[in-house]
Amino acid sequence: MTGAAIVLLTTFLASSVEAIEMVTIVVGVGVTRGWRSTLLGAGAGLALLVVIVAALGAALTAIPIGPLRVLVGALLLLFGLQWFRKGIVRVAAHGLAGYRGQAPQDEEVLSTGVDWTSFVLAFKGVLLEGLEVALIVVSFGASAGHLGTAIVAGAAAIVVVGAIGFAVNPLVARIPRSLLQLIVGTMLTSFGTFWALEGLGVSWPQSDADIAALIAFYGLSALAFIGIERRSARGTLNAVTS
Amino acid sequence: MRVVRSLAGVGRFFYTFVVGDDWTVAAVMVLGLVATAALVANRINAWWLVPPLAVVMTAAALFKTTQRSGLK
């Protein structure tokens, strides 16, 4: 395999990992809260990313990605925990019947008509993950002397993963919203935990694979909480009817 | 006046976005991140602190919600 082919494959695979995180957030938020504001946020994040990349070029590696990870990760963690909790309460109360079709009512939709929660979540996800893809492209491409090849590989990773994300979107949209809120809350909490701690200098034992471990940990905790909430509600009902 | 109203709206939005309906969860999680930073500064790879803390705070918030709704 030639040097350019190795750079192409390595950059594509490394960028795909970041692109999966980006697309997961955008599709999850879009399906849960509506697409208009989510796509506006993703577009704004992409536009800012293009400006940053165009302005800095190869100097991109000077961006302090650690503090950015802490900021974005902490915000995602705090917001994700809110959806995590609400998802648990709603799935425990309504099961998988959910509350399909209702407009988002939990957070503010300001008078501009933009759902800022969706906007900010998509904006942050695209900007941070896009910056990470750009950093991978610059690091791999510049160090191997194949920057053009690395740019093609990074862009291809985003396009391919994005296309897969939007292809599965109709399937995701069929999931009841209470369950979807719990799933997206679990994802946001997991990504937020991972990024915030990585930004603080924590070294995850299994690197990116620990995102899956975090999703499993929070997911199993959610199942336990749903079981406890349901038993508690049944106990109350029995006490009232006996 | 319109600018002040807009700024207040943005402030309300970010408060709701970050803090939500239970400020104690946000406060404890921020303290958890600060504690992790302190441990990392002392060469302790504290990846194990925040995830259990998030689960404990979720349990506490769920308990408070159940108490408030009068189910217990």
Image (cartoon, helix red, strand yellow):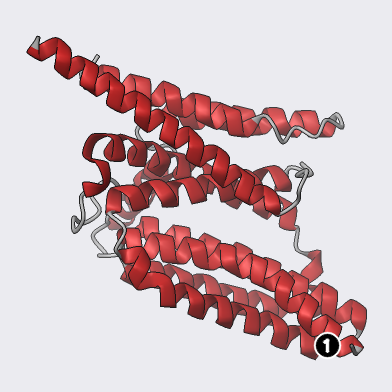
Residue B37 is left or right of residue A228, and the answer is: right
Task: From the top left corner, tell me how far across and down residue A116 is, in percent.
Answer: 36, 58
Residue sitting nearer the eye, B35 or B62 = B62
Say which residue label 1 marks: A5
The chain containing the residue under callout 1 comes to A
User: Which residue lies most toward the left here?
Assistant: A241
Residue A9: x %, y % from top left: 77, 80
Vertical relation: A128 (above or below) B50: below
Q: Is residue A129 above or below residue B59?
A: below
Residue A131 in sight from this viewpoint = no
Q: Secondary structure at mark 1?
A: helix
Instruction: Please tell me which residue is depicted at 36% across the width and 29% down the height of the picture.
Output: A227
Where residue A180 appears, as percent x and y from the top left, is: 35, 53
Dot 1 amino acid type: Ala
Reply above or below: A199 against A167.
Answer: above
Q: Quadrant of residue A158?
A: bottom right
Instruction: Answer yes or no: is residue A36 visible.
Output: yes
**Looking at the image, residue A21 lies above or below residue A170:** above
Q: Splitting the image into 4 quarters, where does residue B44 fall? A: top right
* Residue A218 picture location, percent across and down: 52, 39
Residue at position x 16%, y 10% in the image:
A239
Residue in the image at 61% along x and 62% along y? A128
Task: Mark 1: give few (<14), some (14-19) or many (20+) Cα within 10 Å.
Answer: some
Q: How many marks?
A: 1
A159 left or right of B2 in image: right
Residue A18 lies in quadrant: bottom right
Q: Quadrant of the N terminus of chain A?
A: bottom right
Q: Is residue A118 left or right of residue B45?
A: left
- Residue A3 relative to residue A30: left or right: right
Q: Residue at x 56, y 82 (%)?
A: A159
